[in-house]
Image (cartoon, rainbow, N blue to C red):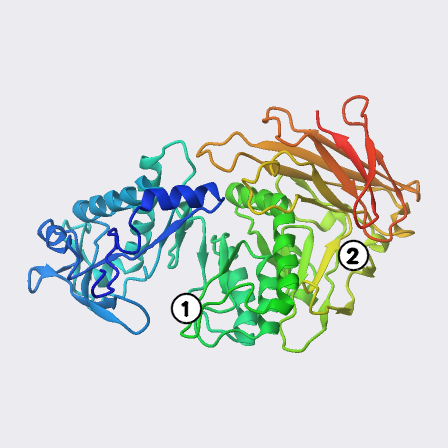
Amino acid sequence: DPVTGARNVFTWNRTRFPDPPALFAQLHEAGIRVAANIKPWLLAAHPDYERVKAARGFVWDNDTDSPCVCRLWSAGGGTSATGSYVDFSSAAGRKYWKDGVKSLLAVGIEGIWNDNNEFSLPDDTHTYAHANLGGAPSSVGSAGRALQTLLMASASHEALLEHAPARRPFLITRAAAAGVQRFAAQSWSGDNWTSWDTLKFNVAMGLNAGLCGLVGYGHDVGGFAGPQPGRELLVRWVQNGVFHPRFCIHSWKPEGVTEPWMYPDVLPVIRDAIHLRYKLIPYLYTLHHEAAETGHPVIRPLVYEFQHDQAVQDRPFEFMLGPWLLVASVLEEGATTRSLRLPLLAPAAERDDHPPALKKPAVTASAAAWCDVWSGQWHPAGTDVSLPAPLHQCGVLLARAGALVPTGPVAPHVATPGFANTDRLVWCFPPPLPAAAGAGESEFVLVDDDGEAAAPRPTRVRLWMRWGGDDTAVSVGAAVVSGTAQPAFAGIQFVLPLGDTRTLRADDCGGAVAAERGVLPDGRAFLRIPLR
């Protein structure tokens, strides 16, 4: 409302937004996809309130035969006004909501953000249109508030698909209930407070969310509420956040919102961290495919991957990013080192079954080790270590022996021309010498698609690595899995860790391979294998 400032969902302030379609077309052209933040209520002054009331589209107060009236967020921090929650179990409420979502999509908004959807209804005796087994309306107390959270997600999801049936829907939800992951791609920890404790304990929250099926989970980097983060806290929060499924710098602070460039002297450090996330997109995208198909979370507690190692069962502040990378962020002010326990790597006979897309390495006890991604230094599994983590470095990042981590180029956004068809660079971590003399192998299936289609035909590229018998070379290979789409990128480049002097050689990839060699900007040699 241009006069009161009240946020009336599905309406436009034409003073601030005179031409929404032109605005969103310009943003889309710049690679910016907009998701609209929408609340599940209508304030009493909303121009559609009486129409939805007449259709009984609100949660209902049977004592007064009128909508349940609450105090609701209206125009910013500390403001409220009377209004009513939409009843997503009612045909009228659901239709109104879906029509409203489609009106936003029609002007160029591309994603929906269900916010403030905990449904803080004040009276358990108020009712929903949803009927119970006896045919009477369900009460708030008996059916629960989470039912509305779930139905709101399904309504927004349906509207996205009905508007563009061939396009993959993208929905964010603040609140969640069992089953909401069928509709919402992302969620987050809500209005977190800016502090070092929040940074630390948000890690454990994210791990728990992933175990509960909410794999696209993250946190407001820098903290949503409270004071602005100091320079060190902001750097460490960004460096941690880039490894989470959802990465978002988001805040509401009286003195100004948190921005990545708010401290010019550490902007290069923050930029490097965000660039790292872009490099990891091929790996992250594959992990999201795996999560959708199997339920394996993207970030995993150490005990999830290493159930045989009792020493890591109470380590909630380190985590695995997929099967290969161990993330140990700096979570304490002033710290420039990070202490942690390196998990034991189970021999093949003790490993749990994993999806056929992933074959974990069968490492011998002597080859069980972890590589510091930043230095190339190896450390034995099952040991306590304290590793350097200066402010310019994204904490401690370790790869398990046998890891194959596909990475991509740095670009302003994934729709940047050339992003899709640039060779993928695979970080290879064969067990260190001399332990690698024992024969072993590992593989990983890289998954990619167009990122848009509701029913995509994915590309699956099998990557593999073999070692042993020759301490001067490591064999690698890549091939498109039969029956999948040809990738946009034409080749796979393989590179060893810093300081590894072994030679990469092309394995048999179903015929003669015209492998090519080159050198990366950091001086490491790579081997390029064209895809068949």
Q: Residue at x 14, y 55 (%)?
A: 49
Residue 317 appears in the rendering: no
Considering the numbered disc 2 on the image, is that residue within a helix, a strand or a loop? strand
- Residue type at mark 2? Cys
Q: What's the amino acid at mark 1?
A: Trp
Residues at circles 2 and 1 in contact by the CB criterion of under 8 Å: no
Residue 426 placement: quadrant: top right
Q: Which residue is mark 2?
A: 371
Task: Note whether residue 501 is visible.
Answer: yes
Residue corresponding to mark 1? 252
Give left or right: position of 76 versus 111. left
Q: Secondary structure at mark 1?
A: loop
Task: Report the front residue among 353 and 432.
Answer: 432
- Is 379 in front, or is 350? 379
Q: Residues within 10 Å of mark 2 (few under 14, many from 20)?
A: many
Side (left or right) of 23 relative to 133:
right
Mark closest to the chain's N terminus, 2 or 1: 1
Give the quarter of the figure containing the C terminus.
Answer: top right
Query: Residue 25 in the image: x percent, y percent?
Result: 40, 41
**Image quarter of the N terminus:** bottom left
The foreground one among 454 and 490 is: 490
The number of discs equals 2
Instruction: Note whether 344 is above or below 323 in the view shown.
Output: below
Q: Position of residue 502 (x, y in %)?
A: 89, 45
Q: Quadrant of residue 299?
A: bottom right
Residue 403 in percent (x, y) is at: 74, 48
Q: Is residue 44 above or below residue 427?
A: below
* Residue at the image point whose x is 39% and y is 50% from the top: 35
Q: Nearer the viewer, mark 2 or mark 1?
A: 1
